[in-house]
Image: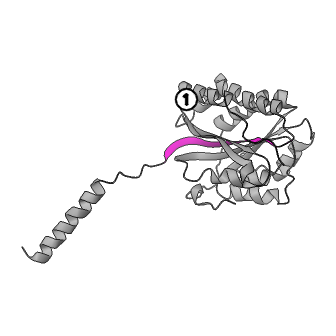
Amino acid sequence: MTRLLLLRIAAFLWVGILFAGTPAKAEDLRVDLELALAIDSSSSVDYGEFDLQVRGLAAAFRDPRVMAAIESGPLGKIAVTVIEWSSPEPQFQRVNLPWTLLDDAESIEAFAEDLDQMPRLQPGGGTAISRALYFAVRQFENNGFDGTRKVIDVSGDGEDNWQEPLEDARNHATAWGITINALAILNEAPDLDAYFRKRLIGGPGAFVITADDYEDFARAIREKLVREIGSPPIALADRPLSAGNAVGR
């Protein structure tokens, strides 16, 4: 056996040893839906109103209809994160609850308990919905999940007051196959639902649901989640190779 052949065999064995000692990269977990819940934490939302949003979300996830919607999907599992948003500066968009897998009654109840205990991270600020969308899009990057659908669920009680076209942020999200739905809280802006329909929502099956005020939020978010989780649009737009390749702003 020649020296060159021996060297080649040795190199081959060494490469094999290196790869054997390196764990394989885990594949993203397939889920029916990746859902980013973006809730209003601006100055127009006092602490009592913020608490009504959080309690309403917790009650909604405990609702048997929401549980049934999650479990009835082809894969029977979704991933959810909760985002607070207000002013345009980066420190005013925060992940409050990280991406969490919901795939059975126990995981759903645990997530509802996390919502019950969720503190407010933002003391107030402006209403920069466009910045919230850019921030939300970035949360889909390398999150460990691969959803058949990706949705940003925006709840708010006012129009965007940042000097940046909201439509640009919407188009940025939808370009990566992300649908934007909205819950318009009408206590301060009675025509907010029309504004959200025109400038905010987008993507396959996008819709707006209204709440008369924060006391009505629990009912509205429950209806929204049932529709959002359990009724995917008949025809989905072409999905990009990976939303994780998006360059967030």
Which residue range is magenta in the image? 28-43
Residue 87 highlighted magenta (yes or no): no
The part of the image, by quadrant, that contains residue 19 is: bottom left
Name the residue located 75 percent from the left edge and 42 percent from the top edge.
Answer: 122
Residue 238, above or below 105: below
- Placement of 165 over or under 222, stated as above or below: below
Q: 120 or 100, which is in the foreground?
A: 120
Q: Quadrant of the C terminus?
A: bottom right
Number of labelled discs? Answer: 1
Main secondary structure found in the magenta portion: strand
Q: Residues within 10 Å of mark 1 (few under 14, many from 20)?
A: few
| Circle 1 residue | 107
Query: Taking the image as drawn, is residue 154 in sight?
Result: yes
Q: Residue at x 77, y 28 (%)?
A: 218
Residue 76 spot, x, y in % from top left: 54, 34
Residue 1 image position (x, y, % from top left): 6, 73
Q: Residue at x 68, y 32 (%)?
A: 118
Q: Could you tell me which residue is drawn at 20 percent across and 62 percent down?
A: 13
In screen coordinates, is 91 left or right of 210?
A: left
Asked if residue 233 can be seen in this view, the reply is no
